[in-house]
Every structure is written in C-alpha cells, then in structure tokens.
Image: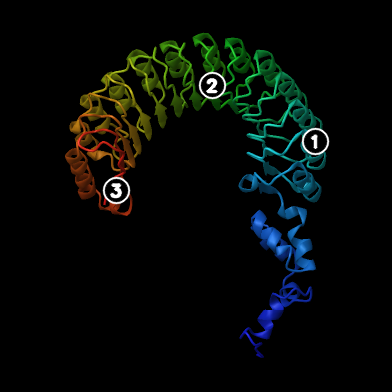
C-alpha cells in the first residue's frame, strides 16, 4: 500500500478522513455505526460529530442521546443548552441529569418537558432556580416520569407535589430533601395520586409532622426507602403508622429525629422483616430493649448507624451478633457504654467471618486493644474507625494486621484501613495498609 509522508497507509487515511466516502462509512451499515455510537459518552459523541457530515448525522441522532449526564459540565450549562438538547433528542431521551446546573431555570425546563415527553428519570438536584412552574410543566407533558430529584430546590412548595400527583401517576422515586416549604398538605396530595411510590427522600423537610407520615403509611404500600433525617417534629406516632402500612420497607433513615423511642424499633421488628438499612444516629432515647426486638425479627439487616445512641450497651451487640448474619456496616461512634466484651461477641457472631466490612468506634472510651483482637476473625473487614479511642495502641493495630494476614493470604491484595485521631502515641489521623 502507498504511504504518505507521515508513514500512514492510504487505506487508513481514507478510513478516517473527513470525506463522507471514507471506507468505514461504506463498509459498515448505518445501523451498525449507530449501535457503536450508542456506547459513547457525551464528549466523545460531540467529537465524532466533527469528523464528517455523515458522522455528524449519526452522532447527533436522537437514539444516541437516551441517557445524558451533564454534572461534569454544570458550570457551563445554561438554559439554552438544555433547550437545544431537548430539541435534538426529543422523544428518545429517557434519562437526564442536570445536577448542580445552577444556570437552568423554569423556562428551559418547560421547553424540555414539551420536547422530551418520554423522560423517565430527571435529576434537578441543586438547580436552585427551579420553582413550582417546572413541576407544573412536568405534570402537563411528562406522564411517564418515574424518578425525580428536586433536592435543594428550595423554592418548591406544596403546589409542586399537587401537580406531580395529577400528572405523573407512575412516579416511583421522589427526592425533595431540603425543600423546607413542603408541609403535610403537599405530602397528602402527592401520595393520593402516586400510590406506587417506592422511595421518598424528605431529609431536612423540617415542617413535616406525624400527620404527613400517616398519609404515606395509608397510601404507599410499595414503599421501600424512606429518609426522614432531621425531620425534627416526627415522633413515634407517625413512624409507627409507616411501619404498619409499609411492610416492604427496607431502608429507613430517622437520624436526628430525637423524639423517637423504642416503640419505633418494636414496630419495625413486628412489621418490617425485610429491613436492611437503619440509620438512627443521634436518637438518644433508643435502648437495648428496642434493639433486642429489632434484631430478633429483622434478620436481613446489613447497615446500621447507631452513632450517639448513648444508652445502648454490649447487650445490643450480643443480639446483633446472634440474629443478624448479613451485617456489613456498623457505626457505634459515641456509644460510650460499649466495651471490649460487646466487640468480642460481634467478632464471634454470624456476620463476622465474611460479612462485616466497616465498624466505626469513634469516641468509645472503653474500647482497648482487646477489641482489635476480637475482630481478627472478620476476614472481610475493610475499615475500622477509632478516632479518640484513647486506649488503642500502635502495637494492638499491628497485631491485628499480622493475624488477619496470616489467617487469610487473600488479604494481601487489599488494604485494611485504620482511622485514628489523638490515640496515643500518634496524635493524628492514620490510614495504615494491611501490607
């Protein structure tokens, strides 16, 4: 084959030339080229569009733009960009993330809704110019919407939830975290029209009271995930209604809901046997009695955040070690009554050998090197947090590393991290590799 001055064969030059008669366009059918382009990201598609007229048509074909994530370009995205994308993609677009795109507002999103009526997943997290007008547009044009993220869109009010209820009956997941103008009236309207909700994120919705949870419990039997973090007015009454009406619940975050008591743990144990994730950090009224009921009934628990549940003792760890064989992540930070004996039971429990991956013991003053000895059987352990555990020593950490390595040579390929702050004799944070 003839070569040009740069040593490139003529056929290869023709293959990638700007000519629409290039070999690749002749050899491969349009359908196959479209299929190849469908695997490319946004940046690569835009580059391909500049190769030739033929590739421009192929790269910008709507079928290649079914899923778009513009988070990496959030500072550059303005309303007109969204409008142009919507006109190009039309009914092909199924999933769009505009997370953090501060320049996008209601007008652009109205154009988007009009053009992209098959949208199923829309992320507007942090799009602070978004108001109720956007939800009105989505309600009017986007009846197939299933997932909507409006977190930190602080202008959203009950009117948005009413609009979604009327026009988006297929909605399964809604995030309105930090939309602190939402009240029980908005929740009531939402759940009456969107009874198929499976995930509801209400973190920081500080006006919500128990009445809102009663509506959810009565109308959302398919609910799997509920986040109520820092909903400070929530009490046992509302959450018990959730437990009784949402038997499929698998993930509950009530961290910062300081009014709740063991009655919630009892209700979860009696009604929600599929529970996998429970986050109740800073719920200081919870005790061993409630966690005993929970552990004996919810055997699928995988993650528990019990930080600052200051009344729990080793008794809770004993119950978890016996009844929760799938436990992977456990936070006990600031649980100052936990001792080495509780960790001993955990280390000998059903989850220890190949499940437990993370244990957080920050500010547990009674924990000593003996606890590290008890954790040597946790062969899947990846991280131990020991900030301000004054009785943990470097020698204790070294012994655990050596013993775990000797027991399982497979650990040579990964790291076990220890996070330690002001634990004599090293007053700083360390991440010590296993090898």
What residue do we see at 73% from left, 27% from top?
131
- Give residue 107's mark: 1
What residue do we see at 41% from left, 12% from top?
262
Q: Position of residue 54 (x, y in %)?
A: 78, 67
Work out whether residue 220 or residue 79 is closer to the camera in this orientation and state it: 79
Distance of mark 2 from mark 1, alpha carbons?
31 Å
| Cβ–Cβ under 8 Å for marks 2 and 3 | no
Can I make out residue 85 in this image?
yes
Q: Position of residue 62 (x, y in %)?
A: 77, 53
What residue do we see at 61% from left, 10% from top?
211
Q: Earlier in the sequence, mark 1 or mark 3?
A: 1
Can I make out residue 327 in this image?
no
- Give residue 228's mark: 2
Label 2 SS: loop
Q: Residues within 10 Å of mark 2 (few under 14, many from 20)?
A: many
The quadrant in which residue 347 appears is: top left
């Amino acid at each position: 084959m003839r070569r040009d001055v740069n040593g490139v064969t003529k056929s290869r030059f023709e293959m990638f030339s700007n000519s629409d008669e290039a070999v690749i366009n002749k050899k491969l059918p349009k359908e196959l080229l479209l299929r190849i382009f469908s695997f490319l990201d946004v940046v690569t598609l835009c580059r391909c569009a500049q190769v030739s007229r033929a590739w421009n048509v192929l790269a910008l074909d709507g079928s290649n733009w079914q899923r778009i994530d513009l988070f990496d370009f959030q500072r550059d995205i303005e309303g007109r960009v969204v409008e142009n994308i919507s006109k190009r993609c039309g009914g092909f677009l199924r999933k769009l993330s505009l997370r953090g795109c501060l320049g996008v507002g209601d007008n652009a999103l109205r154009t988007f809704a009009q053009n992209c009526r098959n949208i199923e997943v829309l992320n507007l997290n942090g799009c602070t110019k978004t108001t109720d007008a956007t939800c009105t547009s989505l309600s009017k044009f986007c009846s197939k919407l299933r997932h909507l993220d409006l977190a930190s869109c602080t202008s959203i009010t009950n009117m948005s939830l009413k609009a979604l209820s009327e026009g988006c009956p297929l909605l399964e997941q809604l995030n309105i975290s930090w939309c602190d103008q939402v009240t029980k009236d908005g929740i009531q309207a939402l759940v009456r029209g969107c009874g198929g909700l499976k995930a509801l994120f209400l973190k920081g919705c500080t006006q919500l009271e128990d009445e809102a949870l009663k509506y959810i419990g009565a109308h959302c039997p398919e609910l799997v995930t509920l986040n109520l973090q820092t909903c400070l007015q929530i009490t046992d009454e509302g959450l018990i209604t959730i437990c009784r009406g949402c038997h499929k619940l698998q993930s509950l975050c009530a961290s910062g809901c300081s009014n709740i008591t063991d009655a919630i743990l009892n209700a979860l144990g009696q009604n929600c046997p599929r529970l996998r994730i429970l986050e109740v950090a800073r719920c200081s009224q919870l005790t061993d009695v409630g966690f005993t009921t929970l552990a004996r009934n919810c055997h699928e628990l995988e993650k528990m955040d019990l930080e600052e549940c200051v009344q729990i003792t080793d008794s809770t760890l004993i119950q978890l070690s016996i009844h929760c064989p799938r436990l992977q992540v456990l936070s006990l930070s600031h649980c100052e009554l936990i001792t080495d004996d509780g960790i001993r039971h955990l280390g000998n429990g059903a989850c220890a050998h190949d499940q437990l991956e993370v244990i957080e013991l920050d500010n547990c003053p009674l924990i000593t090197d003996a606890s590290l000895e008890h954790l040597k059987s946790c062969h899947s352990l990846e991280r131990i947090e020991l900030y301000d555990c004054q009785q943990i020593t470097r020698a204790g950490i070294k012994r655990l590393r050596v013993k775990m390595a000797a027991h399982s040579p497979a650990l040579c390929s990964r790291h076990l991290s220890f996070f330690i702050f002001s634990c004599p004799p090293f007053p700083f944070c360390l991440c010590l590799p296993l090898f």
